[in-house]
Image (spheres, rainbow, N blue to C red):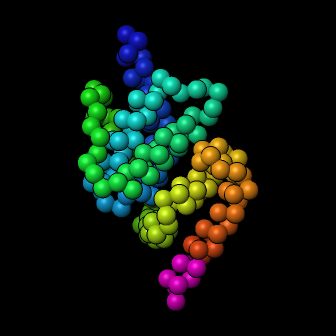
Amino acid sequence: MAAFSERDKFIKIINDNKRLIYKVISIYCGDVDDRKDLEQEVIIQLWKSLKSYNENFKLSTWIYRIALNVAISHYRKDQKRLKSNATLDEEIFSIAEDEYSEEQRNRSDLLYSFIDQLDAFNKAIILLYLEDNSYKEISEILGITETNVGTKIGRIKKQLKESFSQQNN
């Protein structure tokens, strides 16, 4: 019965944090099939790591760290995805996109297309920033100083503004 309880706890964690997971996946994958592969890989890694989660840290920080590490590895490697023998129900692997208006999706898609042009590390920084994480939280997740976070965010924002300006010209 304990395994059932652990499974339910995990499903709740995934459901409560599906927007966070989906945003990480969206930043690193443009293709729908690739997103599904990455989504499964992130969830499998979260499942495998659940027993080692330290409750002294924020759950979102732990999820970001795992999701970003998996996404960056996925982004950098052109190989078949790891397969897991975990017996999780299909319901865990279905993170649906939130319903947004067409205009919101278009603006979001444009932003993500510009973000997609960034290197993997800068993608992670801007994703965490867009999720309203503090500089301190971003520094803890990525293992860099808060000052470095601030500097990088400033540069990335400038680069994104230039991309939007060029798009409008």
Image location (x, y in percent) of residue 33: 27, 54
Q: Viewed as shown, does residue 78 lie left or right of 19?
A: left
- Residue at x 30%, y 56% (from the top left corner): 78
In the image, residue 35 sits, relative to residue 42, either above or below, namely below
Is residue 101 among the parts visible in the rendering?
A: yes
Q: Which residue of the protein is positioned furthest toward the right in this rendering? A: 147
Helix, strand or loop for the magenta stretch, by majority: helix
Based on the picture, tell me whether residue 14 belongs to the magenta stretch. Answer: no
Q: Viewed as shown, does residue 55 lie left or right of 68?
A: right
68 and 23: which is toward the camera: 68
162 and 90: which is toward the camera: 162
Image location (x, y in percent) of residue 50: 47, 27
Res 75 → quadrant: bottom left
Q: Which residues are magenta?
A: 162-169
In the image, residue 12 sits, relative to residue 168, either above or below, namely above
Image location (x, y in percent) of residue 103: 46, 69
Res 6 → quadrant: top left
Q: Which residue of the protein is positioned furthest toward the bottom in this rendering? A: 169
- Residue at x 56%, y 82% (from the top left corner): 165
58 and 139: which is toward the camera: 139
Q: How many marks?
A: 0
Q: Which quadrant holds the N terminus?
A: top left
Based on the picture, tell me whether residue 168 belongs to the magenta stretch. Answer: yes
Is residue 97 among the parts visible in the rendering?
A: no
In the image, residue 158 sits, relative to residue 32, either above or below, namely below
- Residue at x 35%, y 54% (from the top left corner): 77
Image location (x, y in percent) of residue 106: 44, 69
- Residue at x 40%, y 36% (from the top left corner): 45
